[in-house]
Each structure stands twice: as structure tokens, then as C-alpha cells.
Image (tube, rainbow, N blue to C red):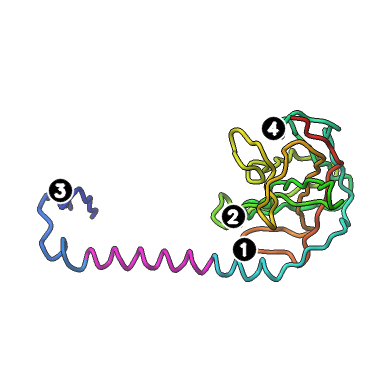
Amino acid sequence: MYAIFSGFHCKCSGTQGRLSASIQSGWYWRWIRVQLWASDMRRLLVLLLFGLTASLAQVAPQSPATLTWKHVSARYRGFNEIKPVLLNEGKQSVFLSRIYPDEFAQLERFDESTGKWESGEWAIRCATVSQPSVPIEIQPKTERSIQIYWQVSTDDWDNPKHFVVETSLEKRPLEGKYRFMLRYALKPWTVFHNPDAIYTIVSPEFLITG
């Protein structure tokens, strides 16, 4: 027995007939609405659990793992030229976040007037990602190419003119001294499992000359 719905027609066991008016306007559409509502509620529950567990995780400033940045030059003409690689020289795996956008590295710019580093604007964290339960693992003695999500830290994705500060949304000149920061953990970090401690590793400094 099988049924194929096309418009308001049904085919069942080789017999074609027209769906009844009660199915068109009654229980069938109520059932559809219930399924959509249930799907929305499940999605909302996942996001609420994600937000709660993510808020409980603590960011530790000092990196306990033995990690080294490769292919980071002292000077670039633009952000799109930066193609860093992270090498895990230690004896234990490290894990990147499966939660968008924390899998990517975040830009930081040095403010000459204050003598402080300023983080670039960052995207809203989202748990709707591909393979949400699969950890991103960098095993010992292996390396991984890291993408810098510089687009969200600038005023224009296609033709950036300014760096945008995360805390104030103030704009800074695009040229200047930069570095980038990557979050990682020592335990699997997925949408459904957030580690107790989150660490950061910072790149060498470099110049953007425009």
C-alpha cells in the first residue's frame, strides 16, 4: 500500500481517486500544522540548550597545548592573502568549535592611540551547521588549514575600506597592525557538547598595507 499526493489527488493500490473535501480542509492540514509546530519546537529547544551550555563554558586565556602557526607572513596587501596553517606539535588532540562562526579565526587590530588590541566584529553564534555532532579534531603531529573570517570584521565583504570594532562598532583604517585569534578546546566541541574550558591561540603580528 502506498499513497502519492499531487495537488489534491491520491493514488493507492493502483486506484486513482480524488481526495475528499474533509482531507483538503480538515484533519490533513491540521496534521501538517502540528508537524511544522513540533519541528519548530525541537529546533528552538536545541538552540536554547546550545545557548545555555555555551554560556557555562569558560574561556581560558593561556594555551596549554603545543600549537604553532605556519605560513604567516609579516606583511600582506589584503586579508584574502592570509592562508595560515595550525600545527599541533603536542601529544594530545585539540578540537575546534563546530558552532558557527567559532571554527574560524577572528581578526584583532592594534589601536595605536590606546596601545590596546581590538577584536573585530563577530557574527552571531548559530547551531544550525552541517555535521553538528561531528568534532573537528586536530590530532597530534598533524596540521590543519585555518580560515580567517575577516569579512565580518570589515565594513564591506567585497570591497572593505574599514575595520569594524566588535565592542563599539567603530570603524578603523584598514591599514595597520593585526593578528588573529582562534578558539579551541581539549575535548570534543560540538553543537551538543560544549567543553568546560575554551582556550585561545594568537597568531604572530603582521601588517596590512592595502
- Which structural element holds mark 2? loop
| Real-space Cα separation, disc 4 to disc 3, in angstroms | 59 Å
Look at the image and tell me in which quarter the N terminus lies.
bottom left
Amino acid type of disc 2?
A: Pro
Mark earlier in primary sequence (2, 3): 3
Query: Can residue 172 be found in the magenta stretch?
Result: no
Could you say which disc has been placed on residue 80 in the image? 4
- Which structural element holds mark 4? helix
Q: Secondary structure of the magenta portion, mostly?
A: helix
Mark earlier in primary sequence (1, 4): 4
Could you say which disc has been placed on residue 132 in the image? 2
Q: Which residue is mark 1?
A: 192
| Real-space Cα separation, disc 2 to disc 3, in angstroms | 42 Å
Magenta segment boundaries in residue numbering? 28-46
Mark earlier in primary sequence (3, 1): 3
Instruction: Give the label, 2 or 4, closer to the camera.
Output: 4
Instruction: Give the label, 3 or 1, closer to the camera.
Output: 1
